Image: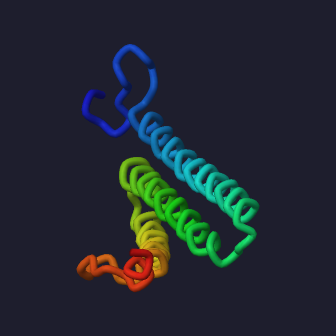
Amino acid sequence: MVGSAESRVRGFGVSTKEVIGTIGVLLDLAGVLVIAVGVTIATVVFVLGWWRTRRLIDVYRPYRQGVGRAILLGLEFLVGGDIIRTVAVSPTFTSVGVLALIVLVRTFLSFSLQLELDGRWPWQANAPRRDRLRKR
């Protein structure tokens, strides 16, 4: 049975599909944790910044950027988990189609968040933003 999709990992009595499925679930968990921890850290930084300055306008944009970065990184882990589970565990036309839709939606979200954070599309040159120029 060596080489089949149901092969056992030597010495552990666990199928390869189970190991790959577990890795996919762990990536999903990591994605959720990255988002939760990132949003929590951004919120703490936001509250402390607001408490210190009492100027919402000074801390709002960095807060949105911190939350956006956490979501972007978390989405990367979630997409990775979906890909691993779908391709390695259950590669049917239906599951691959669902995966394609999920990746499409998450890619759109990633591009939208990237545009919101950097003021440019990911494939555009890294031009300096106006607000960065004003700080100098």
Toward the front, the furthest residue is 136
Tell me, yes or no, if residue 122 can be seen here. Answer: yes
Residue 60 falls in image quadrant: bottom right
The residue sitting at 59% across, 48% down in the picture is 33
In the depicted view, which residue is nearer to us: 38 or 80? 38
**Left or right of 23 in this view: 2:** left
- Quadrant where the image shows the C terminus: bottom left
Look at the image and name its color scheme. Answer: rainbow
The residue sitting at 45% across, 40% down in the picture is 23
Toward the top, the furthest residue is 11
**Where is residue 125 drawn, in percent x and y?**
23, 80
The residue sitting at 62% across, 73% down in the picture is 58
**Left or right of 20 in this view: 63:** right
Is the residue 22 above or below the residue 14 in the image? Answer: below
Is the residue 18 above or below the residue 106 in the image? Answer: above
**Where is residue 87 drawn, in percent x and y?**
37, 55
**Where is residue 130 drawn, in percent x and y?**
40, 85
